[in-house]
Image: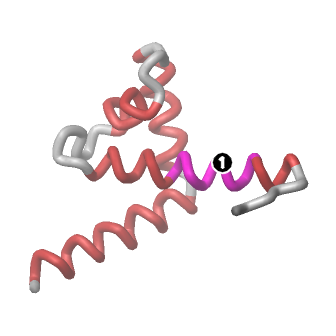
Amino acid sequence: MLIVSSPYIASTFRGMVQEHSFICYYLSEECYGNGTRAYLKLHPTAKYQSAKASASRLLKKPSVQQMLKRKLEKMEGVRKS
């Protein structure tokens, strides 16, 4: 069990999980390459324009770009096998 005592650490961890989930939806067959759709899958009550802006903001983050690059490299490795 993970016990987090600091609100900052809890918030950071939650953000990392959210970024990972966004990337998984972004790369899924259903949303592949569509950040807005991926964001709406993660936050179904978000308005379209908000989802569009938030997805754009997420895709610009260096941590998300690194995670996306790693996942794409893994996917390429699987396809080659």
Where are the magenta residues, as a range?
Answer: 11-19
Q: Position of residue 44 (x, y in %)?
A: 42, 22
Q: Which residue is mark 1?
A: 14
Foreground pick, 20 / 55: 20
Q: Which residue is most to the right?
A: 6
Position of 75 with respect to 81 (left or right) is: right
Q: Residue at x 56, y 61 (%)?
A: 62
Tell me the chief SS of the magenta region: helix
Q: Position of residue 3 (x, y in %)?
A: 79, 59
Q: Position of residue 36 (x, y in %)?
A: 36, 31
Using the rendered view, name the quadrant where residue 40 is placed: top left
Position of 29 with respect to 71 (left or right) is: left
Residue 34 in the image: above or below residue 40: below
Disc 1 on helix, strand or loop? helix
Assign the C terminus to one quadrant of the image. Answer: bottom left
Whether residue 18 is in magenta: the answer is yes
Q: Which residue is most to the front?
A: 1
Position of 3 with respect to 5 (left or right) is: left
Q: Crowdedness of circle 1 by 10 Å Cα count: few (<14), some, many (20+)?
A: few
Q: How many marks?
A: 1
Q: Residue at x 47, y 27 (%)?
A: 43
* Amino acid at circle 1: Arg
Q: Residue at x 10, y 82 (%)?
A: 80
Foreground pick, 64 / 56: 64
Q: Residue at x 45, y 48 (%)?
A: 21
Assign the N terminus to one quadrant of the image. Answer: bottom right
The colour scheme is secondary structure
